[in-house]
Image (tube, rainbow, N blue to C red):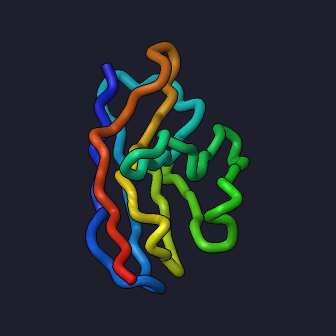
Amino acid sequence: QVQLVESGGGLVQAGGSLRLSCTASGSIFNIRSMAWYRQAPGKQRELVANLISGGSTNYADSVKGRFTISGNNAKNTVFLQMNSLKPDDTAVYYCNVFVTPWGPTWGQGTQVTVSS
């Protein structure tokens, strides 16, 4: 019912920047929230940032001040601007969108690798 397409991952040196994007398509009636999660090798998937309908945002402590989540409602797209990247940010980043009435949908994931 809802499909997500992510882009923007890649390899970057420590201190560099990347911008991830995720676009939702399909039977979209109401987007309640859009979020980015990440999963590093051997670790659990964790919330990086989310954007709630109405505009409120939340960030993991580890990315506050470095990452910014934003959305384009007209294009059903969410972005994650990542600055001052660190090797610890290396992970597969997943987009998650909660659409009424379907519930949460996950993207396929995009690899972000930060070299020291």
Q: Position of residue 15 (x, y in %)?
A: 47, 85
Q: Position of residue 31 (x, y in %)?
A: 53, 31
Res. 9 image quadrant? bottom left
Quadrant of the snapshot with the C terminus: bottom left
Q: Residue at x 70, y 59 (%)?
A: 61
Q: Is residue 28 above or below residue 46?
A: above
Quadrant of the snapshot with the N terminus: top left
Residue 75 showing in the rendered view? no
Q: Nearer the viewer, residue 21 or 27?
A: 21
Residue 82 showing in the rendered view? yes
Q: Is residue 24 left or right of residue 85?
A: left
Q: Is residue 86 left or right of residue 4?
A: right
Q: Position of residue 40 (x, y in %)?
A: 41, 52
Q: Residue at x 44, y 15 (%)?
A: 102
Q: Is residue 22 above or below residue 100?
A: below
Res. 53 image quadrant? top right
